[in-house]
Image (spheres, coloured by chain):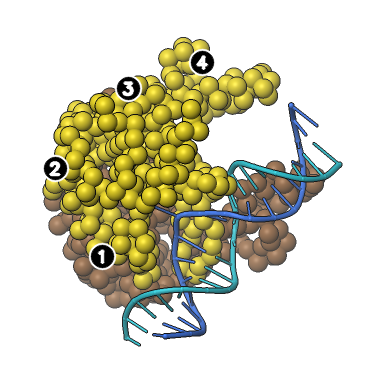
Chain colours: A brown, B yellow, C blue, D cyan
Amino acid sequence: MQDVDRILLGDCRRVLPELPANSVDLIVTSPPYADSRKKTYGGIHPDEYVAWFLPISAELLRVLKPTGTFILNIKEKVVDGERHPYVIEMILEMRRQGWLWTEEFIWHKKNCYPGKWPNRFRDAWERCLQFNKQKRFHMYQDAVMVPMGDWAKTRLRKLSETDKRRDESRVRSGFGKNVSNWVGRSLVYPTNVLHLATETSNRQHSATFPLELPSWFIKLFTQEGDLVLDPFIGSGTTAVAARRLGRHYLGIEVQPEYVEQANKALSAEG
Amino acid sequence: MQDVDRILLGDCRRVLPELPANSVDLIVTSPPYADSRKKTYGGIHPDEYVAWFLPISAELLRVLKPTGTFILNIKEKVVDGERHPYVIEMILEMRRQGWLWTEEFIWHKKNCYPGKWPNRFRDAWERCLQFNKQKRFHMYQDAVMVPMGDWAKTRLRKLSETDKRRDESRVRSGFGKNVSNWVGRSLVYPTNVLHLATETSNRQHSATFPLELPSWFIKLFTQEGDLVLDPFIGSGTTAVAARRLGRHYLGIEVQPEYVEQANKALSAEG
DNA sequence: GTTCCGCATGAATCGATAG
DNA sequence: ACTATCGATTCATGCGGAA
């Protein structure tokens, strides 16, 4: 546990083998999309994407604890007017590697990229694939409970405005026991559809991963003190999320500029 | 064109070969989900689902016009704690058949089935897979434009409640031209995420498929007078949607009770 | 005619029980 | 051991009756 809370510089295909087996509680990552970030990983062509990723997922399978979870945020590109099948091929191949494809969460991007095409609407969702090593894994559902759908309409009607405000801030802070006792029936478990906006004010980082996304999965699948790994950490979003939630983190990034950026962001956290 | 606007009784594996090639503008269907039980279509086991469906999709490829579209509403079940891969295997096999996997729409089910499990949240989405025969297909995007996000906040604030309701029903009825002239700048194109509730309390429709779902795709991919096919039409939802929108329809259903139900629903349309 | 409240109802999933 | 059935869990929706 001495080598955590760091951003490691290097290609994760080289760095991952140096990590001990069964040591990570959660892997959350958004790998470079096919054909993008050409300079870094050589601009993987969609047709070669699966072959490129499988050795990495094999290492991830090794370093993950048996009770751990792997969340893969990914979306297939349109190639020649068609959704390229590399993502679904990857799911099948990873199952052959030994991964269990436990669930597929949908990240609904409330503010998706604008544009207009004659044969296609704007793409407003991405996959967050959940993989596990075994059927029994750690999941802390209470940590991500949300206000009930008609909460504001019904229960809160009788509360004063100040009560309501106090209530909401408590709910948002989220650390549950007293809150869930107090508002108890006002909180429900979420579904497998996440409604999050992309971060507009983000800098030059290509993979715009809102902080909320890794935060949600970190709360759901880890406890304080657990270790979160992101093998394509980019500007450090996952590490910041982990740190804010009191989890240990480990990031891998091949581009020195990103490593620097991530370390700067982490220092700013104090 | 004389044999349309009917619900055909029979297994679609037998009925489809009797239909002429290149005659259908849109196929929208929600096939029976994989089930261990043996009622309709012999209760297809998830492991056999792909083999069962491929001959059907081959026939669908034959009857669809080159400019037509096939929308397949489906969702994989959980089997032994894991999402079963039959849906994604089917996508790959259908591509080998010659289908283009153009897009994947997400139907976000606002009212999903309740429940609580230790390792899983409620499933609130289904796939609406779009397949085509060629890269150029008919798409009428203007027919499904929706009010802008802040529409209710800005424009509608000044309208009375009755005006608002009338307004919404106009938009929902969807015949675009006059509406888009009238509210003009208030309408935007939708994304590939649909937010619809399932119809729960509609008695005789055990329909899982809300009327809005086929309606949306019918408006998007056909014009008035075009032909819509549903090879697993069930209680006739797709036919009702087509009829209301002035499209011809053709339904296939293996269970006589459903055929009767569908015809009754269609008669009620007048 | 309107708003409000109560209630039944789901393309679900898991775990236990029974054959 | 492996499959089939059943009960428990849980919440957004829209209907119907009531004020």
Residue B246, image quadrant: top left
Q: Position of residue A141 (x, y in %)?
A: 53, 64
Instruction: Give the labeled residue for mark 3.
Output: B225
Q: CA distance from mark 2 to mark 3?
A: 27 Å
Instruction: Give the labeled residue for mark 4.
Output: B183
- Mark 2 surroundings: few (<14), some (14-19) or many (≥20) residues within 10 A: some
The residue lying toward the viewer, choosing from B42 and A195, is B42
Q: Position of residue D15 (x, y in %)?
A: 64, 42
Q: Residue at x 79, y 47 (%)?
A: A159
Q: Chain of mark 1?
A: B
Q: Chain of mark 4?
A: B
Amino acid at dot 2 = Gly
Q: CA distance from mark 1 to mark 2?
A: 23 Å
Q: Residue at x 68, y 24 (%)?
A: B161
Q: Earlier in the sequence, mark 4 or mark 3?
A: 4
Q: CA distance from mark 3 to mark 1?
A: 39 Å
Q: CA distance from mark 1 to mark 4?
A: 50 Å
> Which SS class for mark 3?
loop
Q: CA distance from mark 4 to mark 3?
A: 27 Å
Nearest-to-viewer mark from 4 and 3: 3
Q: Earlier in the sequence, mark 1 or mark 2?
A: 1
Q: Chain of mark 2?
A: B
Q: CA distance from mark 2 to mark 4?
A: 42 Å
Q: Quick check: marks 1 and 2 in contact, CB under 8 Å?
A: no
Nearest-to-viewer mark from 3 and 1: 3
Above or below, B135 against D1 in this view is: above
Amino acid at dot 3 = Gly
Instruction: Give the labeled residue for mark 1.
Output: B47
Do the residues marked 2 and 4 share a common chain? yes
Instruction: Give the labeled residue for mark 2.
Output: B98
Q: Earlier in the sequence, mark 3 or mark 1?
A: 1
Above or below, D5 against A27 in this view is: below
